[in-house]
Amino acid sequence: MKRTIAVIRGDGIGPEIVNQALLVLDKTAALYGHEFSYIDADMGGSAIDKWGDPLPQSELDKCLSSDSVLLGAVGGPKWNHVSGPMRPEKGLLRLRAGMGVYSNNRPARIWPQLASASPLKQEIVDKGIDFIIVRELIGGIYFGRHETVCADGEQTAIDELRYAESEIRRIGRIGFETAQKRGKRLCSVEKSNVLDSSRLWKKVMHELAVEYPDVELSDMLVDNCAMQIVKDPSQFDVIVTENMFGDILSDEASMITGSIGMIPSSSLGEGTRGLYEPIHGSAPDIAGQDVANPIGTILAAAMMLRFSFDMAKEADAIENAVSSVLDAGYRTGDIMAPNCTKVGCTEMGRLILEHLQ
């Protein structure tokens, strides 16, 4: 099978971790008889430096012409002086909107080998952590009107939160369909005791529930959900929520698993083309030192094979290789533990290649 992948190496540690993921993809293609070709695209700080724009149309067009997109990380203090519309992170928002990816799916899973790295009490970890957060990605307050005006003699900031029924319904369907493939439990998270947008969210979710009788739907206020994720994460199977709530809760969920460097995410819309990336940032403080953890990016590549290319056994092979390397006691610095062997980014990639079969 032939597939074209747009590759955004990005900023900071992005190029290092993406290079390791591409090596894993190349070996997977060789083992299973596929052919992957890559198109380099610029986005973020590197695009600002090169083009004066965090996502020029030419680079977006490369992504739209591909079968899927693999992203490293963007941003860093080097570009803190850049004005709002031209900041590196704006390139990512424009990429998501341009690709029409409205669903971000982020797993919160604890690897057994890393259970001791979780900040939660052992009795909580022992109950298991394995859920996924489905986050609406191109609506809500991040995409509303943003302005600062002078009112009554002082500066007043305005950020608009807006959701249409159709936007809620389409992400709701992703939530229900994801739950159908897992434990058939869906928790809809909102703030309906305060926000009109959340009351509409809750109404639409319950209308959709009629179409999915095999899925148990529950409602939870976002502040309670933030508490429950650390109190008893085993209660969750699939969480579906709006953009800003999902942004915050998914970061919280990532930390209880032990390392942000281990977690991939996928962003999908209509069709099979998706955007795949690790959830961590560009970590400019360790860029170029060969110490970054490439596993989140490698697992993001595995997610791409599974969800966009329908290559489940290939994705399984990559995930099994990662697990085997962890079983053998190899760790990058962020997940280092007693009696383990510390390795760098390149060596971790090589070890995963060695165990890939």
Image (cartoon, rainbow, N blue to C red):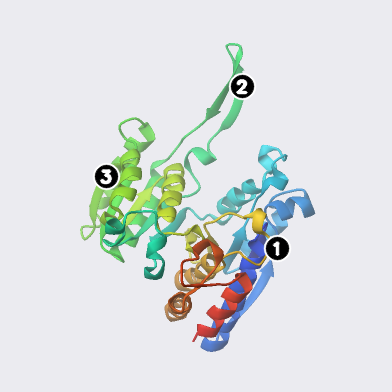
In percent of the image, x 73 and y 55: which residue is there? 46
Query: Looking at the figure, which quarter contains the N terminus?
Result: bottom right
Q: Which residue is mark 3?
A: 219
What is the number of the mark on residue 149? 2
**Mark 2 residue element:** strand
**Image check: 96 left or right of 197?**
right
CA gap between label 3 and label 2 equals 37 Å
**Image check: 141 left or right of 237?**
right
CA gap between label 1 and label 3 equals 45 Å
Tell me which amino acid carries mark 1: Gly
**Mark 3 residue element:** strand
Q: Position of residue 257 (x, y in %)?
A: 40, 59
- In this rendering, which labeled residue sits more in front, label 2 or label 1? 1
CA gap between label 2 and label 1 equals 42 Å
Place residue 151 in its image quadrant.
top right
**Mark 1 residue element:** loop
Q: Is residue 183 above or below residue 329?
A: above
| For marks 1 and 3 on the same chain, the one whose residue lies earlier in the sequence | 3
Count neighbours of disc 1 (C-alpha within 10 A) and say few if under 14, some if 14 to 19, many if 20 or more: few
- In this rendering, which labeled residue sits more in front, label 1 or label 3? 1
Q: Which residue is mark 1?
A: 288
Q: Position of residue 269 (x, y in %)?
A: 48, 58
| For marks 3 and 2 on the same chain, the one whose residue lies earlier in the sequence | 2
Tell me which amino acid carries mark 3: Asp
In percent of the image, x 37 and y 69: which residue is there? 112
Count neighbours of disc 2 (C-alpha within 10 A) and say few if under 14, some if 14 to 19, many if 20 or more: few
Q: Position of residue 60 (x, y in %)?
A: 66, 57
**Residue 2 in view in this figure:** no
**Residue 287 in view in this figure:** yes
